Image (cartoon, rainbow, N blue to C red):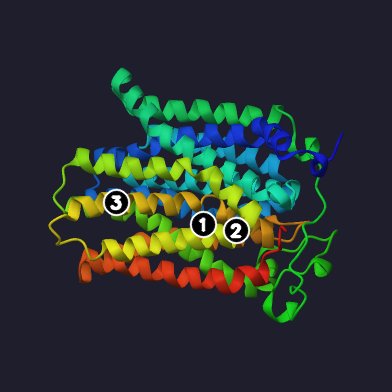
């Protein structure tokens, strides 16, 4: 078989479709169909609004907690087995949701699904890191992120249709289960991606990476073992330098992206807009975001990672900062719609950046343990951002909370300017 490095980008991406992008789309469709129903089911089990929001957050918390164990499992057992076993456990979690009679049991089932979702995400990330050449890695990973976004975008509409037809949330849960069974069948009985696409040559590292590697944890090609695998925590310590520097910049990007999902609906409510108007503004912003996912990969592959990361952070940072000054203006609704579009453009340009940067700096022969740490950092940034907005809004005002996210974006942009050239290999 011809090696992956000899193929054109299009041929390789088409080859990945049934092995990587297909399971990703199926999982995202099912998860997207169920996520909107979690607060509804929690309310039926006796939760108030605040507690229902906390139960919904169990999905994110589960994924955050699952990243490091997933890194260990992928490094020890491989991508295929990890994904297959995680898929089976997700089915158990779905059964728990259907038959849950208490809020605590329901929350545990939601947490379990999020925990296993981390294994799916990390296994695919690890596979792409070792199989995709550096020259079109960003396009491949941006397409992976775009496939997930497509599933999460379409999933709620499928759920709404199922609710209209069957009148019960169980129909959407069954739909997720069917998607999950199809995913498991693809993983276990489809072409084995680990055999169909051989591991490519290790990606070149930045020429400055050999400096003070033992003290800073910078990625160094020559010091990475090729036979003996390092443990997750040893890997975290070894790469503590890059995680504490570029990893924190990446976490700030994740925080800003997560804040956008919270801020836009809240800002519309604070302006007194009706639900339909808010839905249209958020929907248009999301459509712009989705339309740009592949463009982000093109930019990163052609011009470098910083050319996508920096504009994305600048656009989102300036969008949040400017929006924070418009609340009491006479034309506040117009500014709201305009800056929602700006945030959509910025978020779209950031598609695949976190996946690509993680792949760029991971050890090329055994990336899973490192990626578990990397994804934990970025997921933590996304999980903390809504809490920051909520706390600042409660203590001061929503404008202050939104402005704070703009400042975080500015600091993150400065981090990318400082650390991307140092740690990320050049593609040209």
Write the residue at 33% across / 29% down.
169
Write the residue at 70% across / 46% down.
127
Q: Distance from label 1 to label 2 (Cα)?
A: 7 Å
Q: Position of residue 331 (x, y in %)?
A: 16, 54
User: Is 232 in front, or is 352?
Assistant: 352
Vertical placement of 206 versus 187: above or below?
below
Q: Quadrant of the C terminus?
A: bottom right
Q: Quadrant of the N terminus?
A: top right
Which numbered mark, 3 or 1, is in the foreground of this view? 3
Tell me: 199 left or right of 26. Answer: right
Circle number at residue 68: 2
User: Which residue position is annotated with label 3?
Assistant: 338
Circle number at residue 65: 1
Q: Distance from label 3 to label 1 (Cα)?
A: 36 Å
Can I make out residue 38 in this image?
Answer: no
Which numbered mark, 2 or 3, is in the foreground of this view? 3
User: Is 166 in front, or is 219?
Assistant: 219
User: Is 295 in front, or is 126?
Assistant: 295
Write the residue at 66% across / 30% down.
18
Asked where in the image residue 335 lies, by quadrant, the reply is bottom left
Q: Distance from label 2 to label 3 (Cα)?
A: 39 Å
Q: Could you tell which of marks 3 and 1 lies nearer the N-terminus?
A: 1
Which SS class for mark 2? helix
For the residues labelled 1 and 2, say whether their Cβ atoms are less than 8 Å apart: yes
Q: Could you tell which of marks 2 and 3 lies nearer the N-terminus?
A: 2
Which SS class for mark 3? helix
Can I make out residue 156 in this image?
Answer: yes
């Amino acid at each position: 078989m011809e090696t992956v490095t000899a193929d054109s980008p299009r041929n390789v991406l088409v080859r990945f479709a049934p092995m990587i992008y297909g399971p990703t789309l199926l999982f995202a469709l099912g998860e997207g169909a169920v996520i909107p129903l979690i607060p509804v089911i929690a309310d039926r089990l006796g939760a108030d609004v605040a507690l229902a929001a906390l139960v919904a957050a169990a999905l994110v918390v589960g994924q955050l907690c699952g990243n490091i164990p997933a890194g260990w499992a992928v490094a020890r057992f491989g991508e295929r087995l990890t994904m297959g076993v995680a898929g089976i456990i997700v089915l158990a979690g779905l059964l728990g949701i259907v038959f849950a009679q208490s809020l605590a049991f329901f929350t545990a089932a939601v947490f379990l699904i999020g925990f296993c979702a981390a294994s799916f995400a990390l296994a695919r990330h690890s596979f792409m890191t070792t199989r995709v050449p550096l020259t079109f890695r960003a396009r491949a990973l941006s397409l992976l992120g775009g496939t997930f976004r497509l599933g999460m975008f379409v999933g709620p509409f499928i759920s709404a249709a199922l609710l209209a037809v069957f009148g019960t949330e169980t129909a959407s849960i069954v739909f997720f289960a069917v998607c999950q069974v199809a995913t498991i069948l693809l993983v276990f009985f489809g072409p084995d991606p680990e055999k169909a696409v051989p591991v490519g040559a290790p990606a070149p590292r930045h020429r400055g990476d050999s400096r003070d590697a033992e003290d800073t944890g910078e990625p160094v090609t020559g010091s990475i073992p090729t036979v003996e695998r390092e443990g997750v925590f040893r890997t975290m310590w070894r790469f503590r330098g890059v995680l504490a520097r570029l990893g924190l910049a990446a976490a700030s990007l994740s925080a800003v992206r997560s804040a956008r999902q919270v801020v836009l609906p809240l800002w519309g409510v604070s302006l007194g807009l009706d639900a339909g108007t808010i839905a249209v503004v958020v929907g248009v912003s999301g459509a712009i975001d989705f339309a740009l996912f592949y463009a982000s990969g093109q930019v990163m592959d052609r011009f470098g990672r910083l050319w996508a990361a920096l504009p994305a952070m600048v656009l989102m940072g300036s969008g949040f900062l400017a929006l924070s000054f418009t609340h009491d203006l006479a034309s506040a609704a117009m500014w709201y719609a305009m800056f929602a579009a700006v945030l959509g453009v910025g978020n779209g340009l950031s598609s695949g950046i976190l996946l690509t940067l993680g792949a760029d700096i991971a050890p090329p022969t055994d990336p899973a343990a490192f990626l578990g740490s990397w994804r934990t950092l970025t997921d933590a940034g996304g999980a903390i951002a809504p809490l920051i907005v909520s706390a600042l809004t409660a203590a001061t005002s929503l404008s202050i909370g939104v402005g704070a996210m703009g400042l975080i974006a500015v600091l993150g942009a400065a981090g990318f300017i400082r650390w991307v050239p140092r740690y990320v290999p050049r593609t040209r």
